[in-house]
Amino acid sequence: MRTNQPQTICLSDYKVPAYLVDQVDLRFELFEDGARVHSVLSVRRNPESSGGDEPLYLHGDSLVLESVALNGTPLAAGDFDDLGDALVVSSVPEAFELQVVTWIEPQNNTRLEGLYKSSGMFCTQCEAEGFRCITFYPDRPDVMARFRTRIEADRDAYPVLLSNGNPVAKGDLEGGRHYVTWEDPFPKPAYLFALVAGDLVEKKDTFTTCSGRSIDLRMYVEPRNAQKCDFALDALKRSMRWDEDVYGREYDLDIFMIVAVDDFNMGAMENKGLNIFNSSCVLASQETATDAAFQRIEAIVAHEYFHNWSGNRVTCRDWFQLSLKEGFTVFRDAQFSADMGSPTVKRIEDATLLRTAQFAEDAGPMAHPVRPASYMEISNFYTLTIYEKGAEVVRMIHNLLGESLFRQGSDLYFQRHDGQAVTTDDFVRAMEDASGRDLSQFRLWYEQAGTPALTVTDEFDEERCVYRLTVRQSVPDTPGQTGKKPQHIPFAVGLLGRDGQPLPLLFSAGSDDAPVERVLELTEREHCFEFHGVSERPVPSLLRGFSAPVRVHYPWTREQLLFLMNHDPDGFNRWDAGQRLAVDVIQSLIVAPEAEVEPRLVDAYRSLLRNTGLDQALVAKMLQLPSEAYLIELSEQADVAAIHRAREAVLSHLATHLRDELLACYHCNSAQGDYQLTPDSVARRSLRNTALGWLLHIGDQQGLVLAQEQLRSADNMTDRLGALRALVNSDFVEERTQALEGFYQAFREDPQVVELWFSVQAASVRAGQLPQITQLLEHEAFDWKNPNKVRSVIGAFASQNLAAFHNPDGSGYAFLATQVCRLDDSNPQIASRLVTPLTRWRKFAPEYRVLMKSALERVRDKDRLSGDVYEVVHKSLAD
Ligand code: PHE
Ligand code: ZN
């Protein structure tokens, strides 16, 4: 842990590595009281480095150095410096072998970086800079080496020993121990190294690649999870096929392994040939996983698999390029999910995440470009901007180039850079070279932080039959970045006539080329587009399909929004029109709490509930009211209590006036036949559970009976949790207490379900007030060392239960500050993520702001604050 101030690292200081490593030979001796790591590095000077005779610099963190030798000769104390966070050997030959032995204590590693223990098994997490917690090494992604790894451990306690690549040797050792040796033929950066040792069951499958090679697929889990592997293995096979079909990418090793671990800081990790997953992102069964969990698992399995090409075969030159692999891979997994399910729903979900959370990040103190220019702790930069906005940037390139040129660009990228560590600029250049398009202005998407805003105005010239759209763009200032240039923005639009028909979009009077949708390319601060042959004032449908990650301001009337909700052929914009209308209605109630709820909103929701003709998946999405988090993001100075009150009032009003329709919707979507994961059955469950939630929200007795019956009889977790959530968010205090207790008793043995159980309460304004949250922390199933438990209670409280967290007495803030300080000592990465809600203090009305700020200052003043939390807190308190 740091005691001094962490350093800022700048992209502009990048230098090629002075030394390269060709081969790494590792031998791990695993024991209960620690592990000894023997490393042999084949090192040579980098011919591309101008460094003269620079010393050899190896990173290290929390290591005990036992010995170091050069070409077999032990180094004396004066030949090297052990700086604590580095081992420096000052004079070395052109090429040599370095032997290093270190001692580490995985059993005491609560940071979950490097080698650690999770439920009795050894596992690793090396991205971004965890390998240096295992041994001294040039721990940077542009140093790529071949790894050979021998693992030695007790045979009974750790029968399964895994690492990257292919197994090449195994055998018994003295004292009941054994070993396995693995060899990975592909050079890789150290962040992709992995090791697992445990008593695990193996689930096997095979996949035949497009060239006819047979790949062994293996999933390793604790014995109690043996029944929760099928879905992930199936998703893996679908991902492998999809990547061949859509990107022409074939898997390269003979074996592909997935391991599930309970203690994990993130979702999953793409280690070469040995992906390691957070249990909650890979284990599933109908009885224990919700539809949302199944979809998340499918997407993450695909994401990690796709990294084998976008990330592993072609990797990042340095961590400023993180979005090179993450943005591209998120884009790929989003395409995959769209192909597996409902493209419109997937787009709505992605846009919602972006607009709610990434826009907030882009407007907050940690705002950074998709390719940041500096950082203190790289682990703070695994952000929505790098991942989600990065994926949007790739998506815009895809849409500007079109399917076929984009594919040629990606082929060129993989061909040109296979086996290399490259930059986002290399990616864009491959796209330019394959397509002949100039993306120089487009590159600003990688360099400028902040969410561009488009202000759209229109005029209709009845005499000339011309409709004119004027679009002004501006990119807001962000910390350290002002005076930004206009960006290249693809802006998809359509126009609807009075009868709801799409109008042809003619740029000049006589032309006959008239598509009904156009992607306008905005490159100037202000752009004016004229559409000819328009005989009546049309309703514009703007930013169709969310064609760019921007905010759009246009003075829509409620009339126009209702019209778009009913007529827009673009499913995304239909949904968006409904959201904008609901936002407008809720906002007017924030200003005037006594005002009447717009009756046309009630009518619109009524016709949605009755509309069986429309795609039910879209209807299910359209019924969701905008979240409190989104309403906060949209406001200048959020008054959380007023937002909460207004949203609840609209919800109650809708539920009261639509009670009969809700009951009808519940019954008409009730479970029929076997549980299925098709978009339609997912939509039906979503509709039914939304209806149930609304009914219980208004204390409906019949709803209560339905919820209790559903909780008893459901054959799947989606319906069971839907009923539990409805009860938890109701005022039926006794019934909800009973339901919670029964649910816990039924699922107490299953950590993934217990996490759901925690988060349903922690996210509920009714069941998750601070005293109840404090009780959850004392619960037998809560575990401070397990990130999922921490997230499901503290994380859910601070980021989903906004009215309780923002209690005007400041107790929620003080609580979070205390927990962040506590977690900072054991797991700084988790602490740093958890503190995020407080860092947004500037967004709130003054009475909240003061209290949030003082909670942050308490965190700032903590003793021995980690570098992770230091960076976030200091940046958010800076002027
Ligand atoms: N690289 C992982 C992914 O995106 C995420 C991750 C980052 C996991 C850092 C662990 C540590 O798939
Ligand atoms: Zn990733």
Image (cartoon, rainbow, N blue to C red):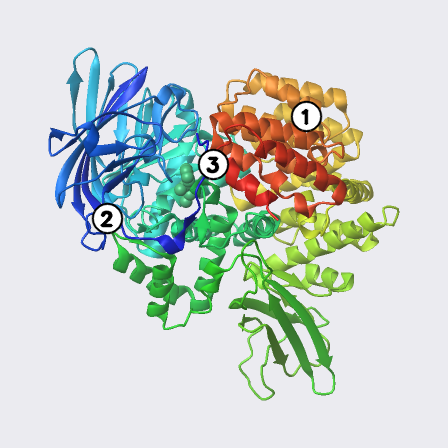
Where is mark 3, residue-wise? 867
Residue 250: x, y in percent?
Answer: 28, 50
The N terminus sits in image quarter: top left
- Kindly report the distance in space between the C-alpha atoms of the residues bearing marks 2 and 1: 68 Å
Where is mark 1, residue-wise? 709
- Kindly report the distance in space between the C-alpha atoms of the residues bearing marks 2 and 3: 27 Å
Q: Amino acid at mark 3?
A: Gly
Residue at 17 percent across and 28 percent down: it is 76
Residue at 60 percent across and 60 percent down: it is 476
Where is mark 2, residue-wise? 18
Image height of 410 relative to 828, above or below: below
> How many neighbours does mark 1 have within 10 angstroms: few (below 14), some (14-19), or many (20 or more)?
few
Direction from residue 256 to residue 285 in the image, left or right: right
Q: Nearer the viewer, mark 3 or mark 1?
A: 3
In this rendering, does residue 759 appear at all? no
Q: Amino acid at mark 2?
A: Ala
